[in-house]
Amino acid sequence: STMEETDREAVATAVQRVAGMLQRPDQLDKVEQYRRREARKKASVEARLKVQSWINFSVLLRTLNLTGNEELRKNHLHITCREVAAIFEYLKIISIKLFKNNSYSRSPAFFLVLLLSFPEIVRETHDLIERGELLQAHRKLMDLECSRDNLMYEQYRMDSKNTHDMSLIHTYFGDMQKLSEELAKQLWMVVQRSLVTVRRDPTLLVSVVRIIEREEKIDRRMLDRKKQTGFIPPGRPKKWKEKMFNILERTVSTRIEGTQADTRESDKMWLVRHLEIIRKYVLDDLLVAKTLLDQCFPPHYDIFNRLLNMYHQALATRMQELAAEDLEANEIVSLLTWVLNTYTSAEMMGNSELSPEVDVNSLDALISQNVVDQLLSKYMSTLTSNIIGWLRKALETDKKDWIKETEPEADQDGYYQTTLPAIVFQMFEQNLQVAAQINEDLKTKVLILCLQQMNSFLTRYKDEAQLYKEDHLKNRQYPQCYVQYMIAVINNCQTFKESIISLKRKYLKSDMEDTLSISHANMDAILDIIAKEGCSSLLDEVFMDLEPHLNELMTKKWLMGSNAVGTICVTVEDYFNDFAKIKKPYKKTMTLEAHRRVVVEYIRAIMLKRISFKNAEERKEGAERMIKEAEQFRFLFKKLAAGSGEDTEGLCDIIEAIAEVIKLTDPSLLYLEVSTLVSKYPDIRDDHIAALLTVRGDASRDMKQTIIETLDQGPSQPNPNYVPIFKEIMVPTLTVPKLLK
């Protein structure tokens, strides 16, 4: 048949051609090249045949239309007919209107080819997008868009009111819009991952930027044409550059929001972790942006600064959200420390590798001063109630120790103490260190708060020590270690004093010193009272034990030779072995006070008139015993005050001076002896002298009267160091001789 003949001819011709191409050995290397060239020729011929077949088909369609044969029409591929119907509409537009009017340089055949090859180009472009060959895909898309836009523009110029023809073109090229969206989707995926892509495949990112730049150029051209002609194609301007920045902005926001992995319920440190992850991510991202990303964008994009601004805005939003949450005190500190310090530090925006592009001084605040103030005020009120609670708990815990049956621990120098001062000041220190992280001002506020609370705490401490003493007095056997714990309370006062000084030195600027001097003086005063009352209660213990022995002084039994003073000295010394555990300033006071009280009690015993000497012999014996006992006291207190450099001689001298009055054998010299005594100790009252003369036992009522009256005129020359001692000694009146002990 003719068909077979044609095939044979074609094969023969092909063989001849191939033989002609491969005559030399070196031509074998070019086989692949020949094959590609022939394939191109073949494609070209096929395209022409395709057009021809469309033209033939159009004739067929017209014939079908003319015959009016309904059945025949239905049987001829109605789908194809619908698809092609539009083409004839366009041909009608172009060939009749454009070509006849000579208004366009291309022939209808050109548009026909374009229209016929459109679905094929769309498919090819789609494949290129799928394979990620974005630049080539975009090149094809631009060609298609350009042809469509030109067609529409020509139509617009010819008849701008013919919206029907316009929408026909638009509908036919509808797939092109989808292609554009498909390509955009790919671009935005690259943009979203730009900080990762720039490290792995920077060329891909560069391609995306080039596509966006091309689109921006077309946008500008179209907008210019719109100004001149009023025409702009559908979908323009695309504004892909703006979209790219919007996508970057959303990506940055999501990146920052997505760093919160935990909640307070699952992790107490949730906020610290969240902020640390943000810090790390932002710093890493900005370093990549500065060193790599910047090179992938044209300079006018100012990409690094734009990104920096996006991160700053996203951070500001996130920090404001966090600030609005119901934060605990430690979380407020974490947030403010991060916002006010970490953000601008070398660990983040102040990193040397980000400079000079990032200038921390020109960065806006992440949260407003107003919000900062609100957070600080909330922090201070929470901290206030926390400190009150902590101090109360610390004191309760300490009080439980006071009733233990074991001695309190001693410090490295052997002084008894409890853990209370250490616990209190450790808590103050921690809160001050935390406040110092935020700023100087808060640190000062917290220090003032700590010292204010310390003031009221010390008042409670004083009251508790007083209650401790009172409970003990109800039953002196309990608590077992009362003396030792009272010593610890006294020593704590000294520790508190030292700690307050060191806390102020460490955390208070010298110019603020005055603002706290009153409260400091107040605390020192309270501490002195606690220590003084503590020392006093310990001496009360001593003198309660001494009472039976003091009652023996200046009695018949005493004169006969009792050992009361020996027992008194042993008991005092025994107590002072414990008192050695009292810190120096207080121990010194204790020794002086004990010495003074022993002398006072001794003189009181004389003034009680429990004995009245019968003769010179008894007076001599009693006086010598008094002098001897004064010497015993002197020796004891010298030993107890060893190393303190205190001169306590004077106290025992009073006992000796009284003994001299009693010992005197010549009554005519009695006035002189008494007047010497009064000039030395001017606080001696008339009743003291009367009592003394009664104990002496040989002065008549008239003689007493004369001596007392004469004395009133005499001058006094006391020792300037003399502390009045007689004024606290009562002399019983005749009506109740024994009850006024």
Image: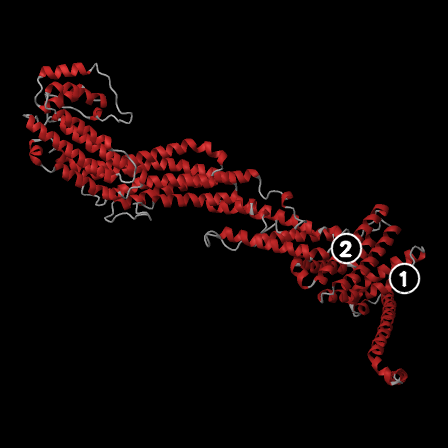
Label 1 environment density (alpha carbons within 10 Å; few <14, some 14–19, many ≥20): some
Q: Amino acid at mark 1?
A: Pro
Q: Nearer the viewer, mark 2 or mark 1?
A: 2
Which quadrant: the C terminus? top left
Specify which label sits upstream in the sequence, 2 or 1.
1
Would you identify the image quadrant in which residue 10 lies?
A: bottom right
Q: Position of residue 313 (x, y in %)?
A: 62, 47
Instruction: Using the rendered image of the protein, determine whether residue 61 is visible from the camera's viewpoint.
Output: yes
Label 2 environment density (alpha carbons within 10 Å; few <14, some 14–19, many ≥20): some
Q: In the image, what residue occupies the spot 41% across and 37% down? A: 451
Say if 152 sits above or below 403 in the image.
Answer: below
Q: In the image, what residue occupies the spot 17% across and 29% down? A: 656
Q: Pointer 2 and pointer 1: residues touching (CB < 8 Å)? A: no
Q: Residue furthest left?
A: 614
Judge left or right: residue 559 versus residue 367: left
Which is nearer the eye, 67 or 346?
A: 346
Q: Secondary structure at mark 1?
A: helix
Residue 150: numbered disc:
none
Q: Position of residue 150 (x, y in %)?
A: 85, 56
| CA distance separating discs 2 and 1 | 33 Å
Which is nearer the eye, 62 or 133?
A: 133
Q: Amino acid at mark 2?
A: Glu
Q: How is the image coloured?
A: secondary structure
Instruction: Using the rendered image of the protein, determine whether residue 466 is visible from the camera's viewpoint.
Output: no
Which is nearer the eye, 583 or 275?
A: 583
Q: Secondary structure at mark 2?
A: helix
Judge left or right: residue 344 versus residue 612: right
Mark 1 lies on residue: 108
Which is nearer the eye, 439 or 631?
A: 631
Residue 213: numbered disc:
2
Q: Position of residue 236 (x, y in %)?
A: 77, 52
